Amino acid sequence: MAKPVIIVGAGLSGLACARTLQARGIETRVIERSSAVGGRVQTDAVEGFLLDRGFQTLLTSYPEAQRQLDMNALDLRPFDPGAVLWNGDDFETIGDPMRDLGALFPTLLARAATLRDKLEVLRLRRDVLRGDDYDAFESDDVPTLAYLRGRGFSEGFIAQFFRPFLGGVFLEPELATTARFFRFVFRMFSSGSATVPARGMGQIPAQLAEGLADGTLMLDTHVSSVSPDGVQLQSGRRLDAAAVVVATEAPAAAPLVPSAPVVGSRAVTCVYFAAEQAPTSRAALHLNASGRGVINNMHVASAVSPEVAPDGQHLISVSCLGAHEDALALRDRVQDEARRWFGDDASRWSALRHYVIRHALPAQPPGALEPPRRSVRSSSGVYLCGDYLDQASIDGALVSGRRTAEALAADLRVAATG
């Protein structure tokens, strides 16, 4: 019997790698330490609510997602284009009049942006929509903040819009992330919609796993070491393999493959609340443009997808950058700030769950995407995949899984023809 390819990790990249290999007739086994697939993309059922493990969206314009996912089957629910800004005193809307004509008037009146800022957004949109989806990764490799300043955006607009909006994307408000990733992300937002599956982001890995052959997944199984021809389990059992792929997040890959790239991480904390009265009926992302407070962004998740909350209840998602370990203290701070945003009703919100995601995204400073796609072959002979080898997004995770599978399949063919 031929030995299978063993993939360590059942996140998006590992599942995409397995599906690509199996489509080429290559037997695979996917070993996952936890009890469910998805890695950082999972959804928990809590008291009748469906809670994603941290706020995430699927951009419909992601080219690799279009290639690998059945988007219709995910029953995607879109956010309103643009965002609602809390300036410390009131809300104002920065919309996308190109896709929502009703947003034109409030956007023109928004005080957060000068006329030059509004015109420059249109020019930026025009520029990023030129060429191929991945051309952005060949552009200037400078911090996003320097890039925005170089384009002439005002400091006020950068502070009130770009810092909270991109802070939620990059998980860092300094905008130190390379402008290569910013241009790609801005293109994706400009050409598609930010969405979530009706029953949570966990539907994405569930769909990928459904396409695998029976017996592929080994859950609740801890791998203690790897080699090019097999893995050692914590139980003491050894599994032989035709090849081994480590498809974990970067911090977990390093102990298994010492030659794996060393990549920093961005952390985020997400707090969910239940409410009998929604603070807003809008399916819009609300950004903290005040420059004060712990909230970076929030939204009423049940306004985007009613399926995530029981009848008569509403689900509120709040994201705070960094790792906030004290759940009670953070809850109190969030509700205190939310009272300023929405009034005393926020005092009656009931905390559901507090997620600290320490390795939510790989850091991507200038140089991180040079080259834009790094080698999937380690010096030890073990293969690697994960968004830290491409770009820090769902699209990057899916691309990485496919790239690794294609490289591995080519190497197996060469070895077989020897």
Image (tube, helix red, strand yellow):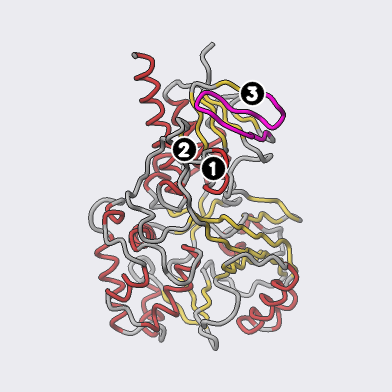
Whether the residues at callouts 1 and 2 have beta carbons within 8 Å, the answer is yes
* Amino acid under disc 2: Leu
The magenta region covers 221-237
- Amino acid type at circle 1 is Ala
Cα–Cα gap, marks 1 and 2: 8 Å
Along the viewing direction, whichever of 220 and 415 lies nearer the viewer: 415
Q: Secondary structure at mark 2?
A: strand
Which type of secondary structure does the marked residue at label 1 adopt? helix
The disc label shown at residue 71, or none: none
Q: Residues within 10 Å of mark 3 (few under 14, many from 20)?
A: some
Q: Which amino acid lies under the numbered mark 3 shown in the image of this protein?
A: Arg
Give coordinates of residue 156: x percent, y percent: 40, 84
| Location of residue 276 (image quadrant) | bottom right
**Observer-nearest residue: 69 or 358?**
358
Badge 2 is on which residue?
384
Q: How many marks?
A: 3
Q: Residue furthest top?
A: 1
Q: In the rendered structure, does residue 236 fall within the stretch colored magenta?
A: yes
